[in-house]
Image: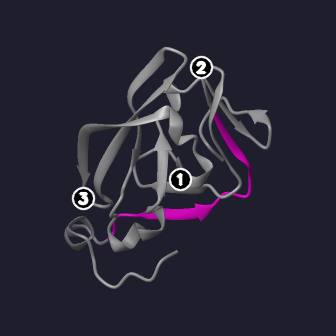
Amino acid sequence: MSDNSHASPGFSKNPGYVIELLRSSRRVRVVFNGATIADSENVLLMREQNHAPVCYFPLPDVALKHLQRTDHATHCPYKGEASYWTVSVAGRTEDNAVWGYETPYDEVADIKGHVAFYRGRMDGWFEDGEPVLGQAH
């Protein structure tokens, strides 16, 4: 989706690695402990080699009042440094259940300003109002 002006370290070492970003045609909603945590018609669907598809939600479509940044961080050679947030709603908490790349590598620059949720740690996923039992479409 973005014009890639230079390669990240991971893509330099493994130029055949595939990450595809697609705009979802569906409205996607995430629920945790009875609260809608994210609800968007502007989800980016990441299909990454050897990984299940991941929905990245634009921050304006996320209920940030339920997220608290943590000190946890990880590194991906293809996307960059990931920051994490804990989700808390009405006394129930899931630590480090949300992540995002605040300064992603150029190859995936479109995920800047987006976050993703660990699918199995949320209570409900809906696409166009219908419950999703498996992976994102």
Per the image, the residue denoted by label 2 is 33
Task: Report the Cα–Cα distance between label 1 and label 3.
Answer: 23 Å
Whether label 1 touches label 3, CB < 8 Å: no
Per the image, the residue denoted by label 1 is 59
The quadrant holding residue 62 is top right
- Res 58 seen here: no
- Camera-near label (1 vs 3) is 1
Can you give x and y, in whole percent of width and height, for residue 59 in the image? 53, 53
In the foreground, 67 or 46: 67
Q: Is residue 125 above or below residue 113?
A: above
Which region of the structure is painted magenta? 16-30
Horizontally, is 77 left or right of 37 in the view? left
Which comes sooner in the sequence, label 1 or label 3? 1
Could you tell me which residue is drawn at 49 percent across and 55 percent down?
114
Can you give x and y, in whole percent of width and height, for residue 66 in the image? 51, 32
- How many residues crowd mark 1 within 10 Å: few (<14), some (14–19), many (20+)? some
- Res 113 seen here: yes
Task: Report the Cα–Cα distance between label 2 and label 3.
Answer: 33 Å
Can you give x and y, in whole percent of width and height, for residue 75 in the image? 23, 51
Mark linked to residue 77: 3
Could you tell me which residue is drawn at 68 percent across and 45 percent down?
28
Q: Amino acid at mark 3?
A: Pro
Mark linked to residue 42: none
Q: Secondary structure at mark 2?
A: loop
Please say which color scheme the image uses. one colour
